[in-house]
């Protein structure tokens, strides 16, 4: 019987929570972050559920653990922990973790203004600007993103036949654009997003497989992205990204925005150098840009970058007490 102590910094990126675990996490085995992530999931997933779920977290809780990098070209490694598992990559989580880690001196970039991060999805570069001790904005260059499949259809019980594009932006996204059965995000309540998203994910996952062409260890449709017209005058589009069992991203979602830009690029609606401003369900913005064209397997792909901001809300020392019957958290 023991009490495990975790030193955390809590904050948010454009509204979505980020819990940065700065102390108390286990040493992981593995030659790269994919192997370390597998070790964590095998032996230490109770830390994720304990820190993300109630009573210490909630349905939308999301975070990252800092590790030494496994590759020579990186300053630090991030292991993402979410209510949904350990995502290979999390954009809002990266922006928040970079902001808090820099402001509190937890990382030392080799090159001022740039932090190179080793993530399970690959190298992610974060460029930041500071005002005094505060990080103003962070722009992450995400992993290559691509339209994986266009116009897939499936029968979603209660909603009818739905057509989606599936794109990868660090995670696989079913992108639901307005169509019969879904008039557009502006006509839907968050409760409808929460109700229908798991059913959409289930219907498409039952019928199709989703495997990264160059990294078969990354697979599965984890996120559903509902789209609609922007309300903010600067934005090109608005989204609501569903993940886990009950979470809607409060930010415009970094990997979701990357996937959406890859979809628009494949359709000829974006070109290299174009900006894409994405509005979240609460009206916050990410500023995306198509940095370059590339290829992933047989797919035409983009290198996307996403700019956003984050704020530290406090320090949090959390205990997981083995005597507690709810030590590892619960979800309703
Ligand atoms: O920003 O990439 C993201 C993300 C994934 C899940 C929640 N946020």
Image (cartoon, rainbow, N blue to C red):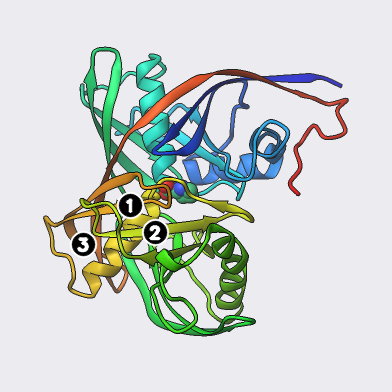
Q: Is residue 326 above or below residue 229?
A: above
Left-right relation of 178 to 10? left
Q: Earlier in the sequence, mark 1 or mark 3?
A: 1
Q: How far apart are the two marked residues, 2 and 1, measured between alpha carbons? A: 6 Å
Disc 2, SS: strand
Where is residue 123 shown, x and y percent of the image? 33, 43
Residue at mark 2? 239
> Which residue shows up at 18% across the image and 73% down it?
268
The crowd level at tag 3 (other Cα within 10 Å; few <14, some 14-19, many 20+) is some
Q: Earlier in the sequence, mark 2 or mark 1?
A: 2
Label number found at residue 279: 1
Among the 4 quarters of the image, the one containing residue 145: bottom left
Q: Is residue 328 above or below residue 83?
A: above
Q: Point out the frontmost of discs 1 and 3.
A: 1
Where is residue 70 shown, x and y percent of the image? 42, 34
Among the 4 quarters of the image, the one containing residue 99: top left
Among the 4 quarters of the image, the one containing residue 235: bottom left
Q: Are marks 2 and 3 in contact (CB under 8 Å)?
A: no
Residue at mark 3? 294
Left-right relation of 53 to 120? right
Where is residue 273 shown, x and y percent of the image? 11, 55
Q: Are marks 2 and 1 in contact (CB under 8 Å)?
A: yes
Disc 1, SS: strand
Can residue 169 be seen?
no
Q: How far apart are the two marked residues, 1 and 3, measured between alpha carbons? A: 26 Å
> Which residue shows up at 76% across the image and 42% down it?
330
Answer yes or no: disc 1 within 8 Å of ligand 1: no
Disc 3, SS: strand
> Which residue shows up at 18% across the image and 70% down it?
269
Where is residue 142 shown, x and y percent of the image? 31, 48
Quadrant holding the N terminus: top right
> Which residue shows up at 39% across the image and 44% down it?
91
């Amino acid at each position: 019987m023991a009490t495990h102590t975790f030193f955390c910094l809590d904050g948010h990126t454009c509204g979505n929570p980020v819990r940065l675990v700065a102390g108390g996490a286990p040493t992981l085995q593995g030659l790269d972050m994919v192997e370390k992530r597998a070790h964590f999931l095998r032996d230490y997933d109770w830390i994720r559920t304990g820190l993300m779920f109630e009573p210490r977290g909630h349905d939308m809780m999301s975070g990252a653990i800092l590790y030494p990098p496994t590759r020579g070209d990186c300053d630090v490694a991030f292991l993402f922990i979410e209510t949904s598992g350990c995502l290979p990559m999390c954009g809002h989580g990266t922006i928040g973790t970079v902001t808090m880690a820099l402001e509190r001196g937890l990382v030392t970039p080799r090159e001022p203004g740039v932090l190179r991060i080793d993530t399970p999805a690959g190298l992610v570069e974060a460029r930041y600007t500071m005002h005094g001790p505060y990080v103003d904005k962070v722009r992450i260059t995400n992993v290559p993103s691509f339209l994986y499949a266009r116009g897939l259809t499936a029968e979603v019980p209660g909603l009818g036949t739905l057509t989606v594009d599936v794109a990868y932006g660090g995670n696989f996204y079913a992108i639901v654009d307005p169509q019969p059965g879904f008039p557009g995000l502006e006509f839907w309540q968050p409760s409808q997003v929460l109700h229908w998203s798991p059913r959409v994910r289930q219907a498409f996952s039952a019928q199709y497989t989703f495997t990264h062409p160059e990294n078969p260890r990354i697979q599965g449709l984890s996120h559903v992205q509902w789209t609609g017209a922007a309300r903010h005058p600067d934005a090109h589009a608005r989204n609501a990204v569903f993940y886990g069992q009950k979470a809607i991203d409060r930010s415009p979602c970094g990997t979701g925005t990357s996937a959406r830009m890859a979809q628009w690029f494949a359709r000829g609606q974006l070109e290299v150098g174009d900006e894409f401003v994405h509005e979240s369900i609460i009206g916050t913005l990410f500023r995306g840009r198509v940095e370059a064209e590339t290829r992933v397997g047989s797919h035409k792909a983009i290198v996307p970058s996403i700019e956003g901001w984050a704020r530290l809300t406090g320090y949090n020392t959390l205990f997981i007490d083995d005597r507690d019957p709810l030590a590892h958290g619960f979800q309703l």
